[in-house]
Image: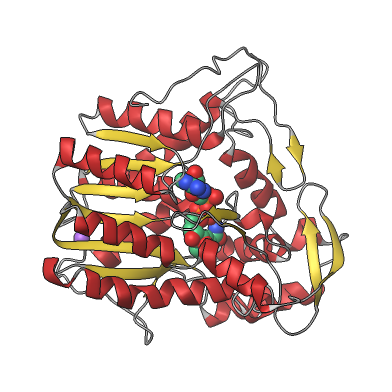
Amino acid sequence: MIIKPRTRGFICLTSHPDGTALNIKNQIDYVQSKGTIENGPKKVLVIGASTGFGISSRIAAAFGSGAATIGVFFEKPAAEGKPGTAGWYNSAAFEKEAHEAGLYAKSINGDAFSDEVKQQTIDLIKKDLGTIDLVVYSLASPRRTHPKTGVAYASVLKPIGQTFSNKTVDFHTGVVSDISINPIESQEDIDNTIAVMGGEDWKFWMEDLHNAGVLANGVKTVAYSYIGPELTFPIYRNGTIGQAKNDLEATTTTINSILKDVNGEAYVSVNKALVTQSSSAIPVVPLYISLLYKVMKEKGIHEGTIEQMYRLFNDRLYTTDGTIPLDNEGRIRVDDWEMRADVQEEVAKLWSQATTENLEQISDIQGYRDDFFNLFGFNFDAIDYEAETNEMVQVPSI
Ligand code: NAI
Ligand code: NA
């Protein structure tokens, strides 16, 4: 079929198999250009492995460190004249490239929050790899069905305490407008968001993997968090999602005690704000990212998910002398360049100036758009979007 982008709000309903494959190939090329990650991981489980930081973690592990990888994700193949999801095509392309490079790569498509998928993953590890030495937890989801109680939780993106009013942008049209977001009405909004995006499911994974005896001595596990600038605090770090991130970060202590007898270590890495399917859904954040991109590109310090994940592995989790640099709260920081004072000062200045009229000049809104469409395999010069393509691409191991 011929596949064109079809968007609804911040969602792209279609994906292009050749464009997403090119996106994966570009990420692999980047990692190979950087060279081998010394002392890197060898058997890696990535939970949330199909898009964003998760697929880039999988690529960094496989092509930077020669790791065997198992990826868990929730994606859809093509059906009834509809293309598959971007994460499906990403995973198909990743496995094909990994297999050609002689690397073990298998995937599990299903609900990572469920006990069934956890058991399926354990069975696969036992059958093929024996143990795992790195578990990457990179899930982002708006809902979770609790595996023990069956309760379905939906997260919300709301401020706590008072209404938050600021600027936002529709990145398709470039229209900057004022937005007011009402605060939570009850504690339930916080509890639901923590139930979806907090640390409980990460803990369940590590408990189950540990009890099954499939964690190697010295295993590491890492989950991803975000802090960001003060101007997004009301909607992000001090909002409902921030409460979930606090819970996720606190879960490292619990997991460290679970992993004691295998000398395991749990970390949270605070990553940079980037265009992903999840971040485009958060109000105000796309305008911040488009200004941040402009400033960071001008300073020559811009990174995408693959640059971030390579740096996380090479300069943080697997350093030459084995020490992991942490902040005062015990977190890994690869948002260090985003949070540099000179970067934040310039973003804040641009933020106060931003209007519909000057946005194309003062921001990198075009870079935002390109990154957004690239996630779905669109806006690549090398792809002929008028040509027929085979949408029925399969993930080899599924
Ligand atoms: P994403 O939307 O690109 O990736 C989410 C992944 O989770 C996908 O692989 C998806 O298939 C998987 N997934 C979702 N629900 C699932 C389920 N029920 N079962 C199995 N798999 C499921 O998101 P992104 O942005 O890469 O986020 C990953 C983590 O990074 C999140 O914790 C996010 O908060 C964090 N982060 C994101 C930043 C950003 O700017 N995008 C910045 C810093 C941290
Ligand atoms: Na290293």
Residue 213, relative to residue 269: is it above or below?
above
Q: Is residue 29 left or right of residue 146?
A: left
Residue 110, relative to residue 293: is it above or below?
above
Residue 106 at x, y percent in the picture: 30, 33
Residue 354 at x, y percent in the picture: 80, 68
Identify the image quadrant of residue 125: top left
Q: Residue at x 16, y 66 (%)?
A: 320
Q: Residue at x 28, y 76 (%)?
A: 325
Report the residue that reaches farthest toward the front.
149
Report the residue that reaches farthest toward the bottom.
328
Residue 297 at x, y percent in the picture: 56, 60
Depth check: give the residue in front, 329 or 150.
150
Depth check: give the residue in front, 321 or 395.
395
Q: Is residue 34 left or right of residue 172?
A: left
Identify the image quadrant of residue 104: top left
Q: Say which quadrant the C terminus sits in.
A: top left
Q: Say which quadrant the N terminus sits in.
A: top right
Residue 148 seen = yes
Residue 152 at x, y percent in the picture: 58, 55
Identify the image quadrant of residue 93: top left
Q: Residue at x 28, y 34 (%)?
A: 105
Q: Residue at x 19, y 67 (%)?
A: 264
Residue 32 seen = no
